[in-house]
Amino acid sequence: MSTGTATMVGRRSPALELPDTDGAVRSLPAPGEAPATVVVWTCNHCPYALGWHDRIVAVARDYADRGVRVLAVNSNDADRYSADSPDAMRARVEAENWPMPYLHDESQETARAWNAQVTPHVYVLDDQRRIRYEGAPDADHMDPSLEGAWLRGAIDAVLEGRDPEPAATDPVGCSIKWKRVRRGASP
Amino acid sequence: MKIELLWWRGCPSTDEALALLREEVRAAGLDPASIEVRELSTDAEAQRERFVGSPTIRIDGRDVMPPGSEPVGLTCRVYRLRDGRVSPLPDRADVREALAGEGG
């Protein structure tokens, strides 16, 4: 179902070490610590991220008792998009009682390392931090009845030691809001 | 009647928005070829147009879904459909009413 976007599937995941909305630094589980981990790039003002959000939250709640970790990451340039500021992120987590930490990638280096392109952009990792699925949560951001089927299917496959099918889909959403490169500065 | 679609390439909704608008323009007995499609690509253009996100549809200069206090900027627009769902596109009924001059 992927149409050619470069995929990270099969690779060991890049590092991830970012502050959550309380300032605590979070990182990926150590190898063997969690049977599966979901990392999802998201944000506060994208209609695609908002449309899929409840389905991702439901996944986090439904798989928590099986030890699956879910980490949400916001890499948007908060200087230009105040809706994605750390204060706005914290307010949303508190108001909506998120079941997963919401991490702020201020430098955007983590997004670049993971090749995250849009919000939402979902990755499913196995217990050795190998990326086993990358793409969208399911086929239609406007159809809640799909319940994040691709994401759930990928987690189920990883938990059962199978290869996810599909292993990659095209992520659909708003482009990550990259910081502008100042003239004379290195990119 | 001036019909405009303003868009920004950071959002994937433009083709869908244009298709929706063309359908409603045709249904209103107007010529879809009259739709002015304009890409905005700089912050200065967004400020000049008071652009609050992509896609934005204006009929005779009036937004089909007036944005209120939404900040100006190159971003994807969040619409709320009449059934309450969040959407990257305006509700089709709002576009239809705007074309019929019923937007208030």
Image (spheres, coloured by chain):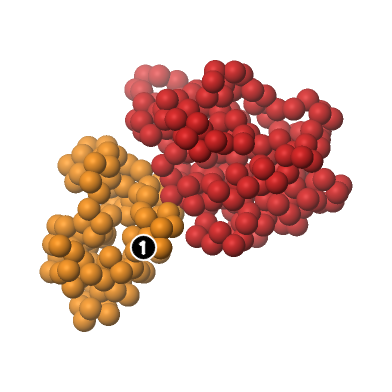
Colour that chain B carries in the picture: orange
Nearest the viewer among B34 and A44 is: A44
Left or right of residue A50, residue B102 in this image: left
Q: x and y percent of residue A66 in the render?
A: 79, 41
Q: Can residue B33 be spotted in the picture?
A: yes
Question: Which chain letter matches label 1?
Answer: B
In the picture, which chain is red? A
Residue B63 picture location, percent across and down:
21, 56
Using residue B26 as the reference point, say whether residue A115 is left or right of it.
right
- The residue sitting at 48% across, 47% down in the picture is A50
Q: Amino acid at mark 1?
A: Arg
Rendered location of residue B102, percent (x, y)? 17, 68
Image quadrant in which you'd find residue A41? top right
Tell me which residue sits at (43%, 36%) in the image.
A177
Identify the residue shown where x is 36% and y is 43%. B75
Above or below: residue A178 compared with residue A8: above
Q: Residue at x 80, y 46 (%)?
A: A158
* Mark 1 neighbour density, 10 Å: few (under 14) some (14–19) many (20 or more): few
Q: Is residue A20 above or below residue A140?
A: above
Residue hosting label 1 = B82
Q: Which secondary structure, mark 1?
A: loop
Q: Is residue A163 above or below residue A102?
A: below
How many numbered marks appear?
1
User: Residue B19, how many percent across, how many down?
Assistant: 36, 69
Whether residue B30 sits left or right of residue A98 in the image: it is left
**Is A129 placed left or right of B78 in the picture?**
right
Q: Nearer the viewer, residue A132 or A37?
A: A37
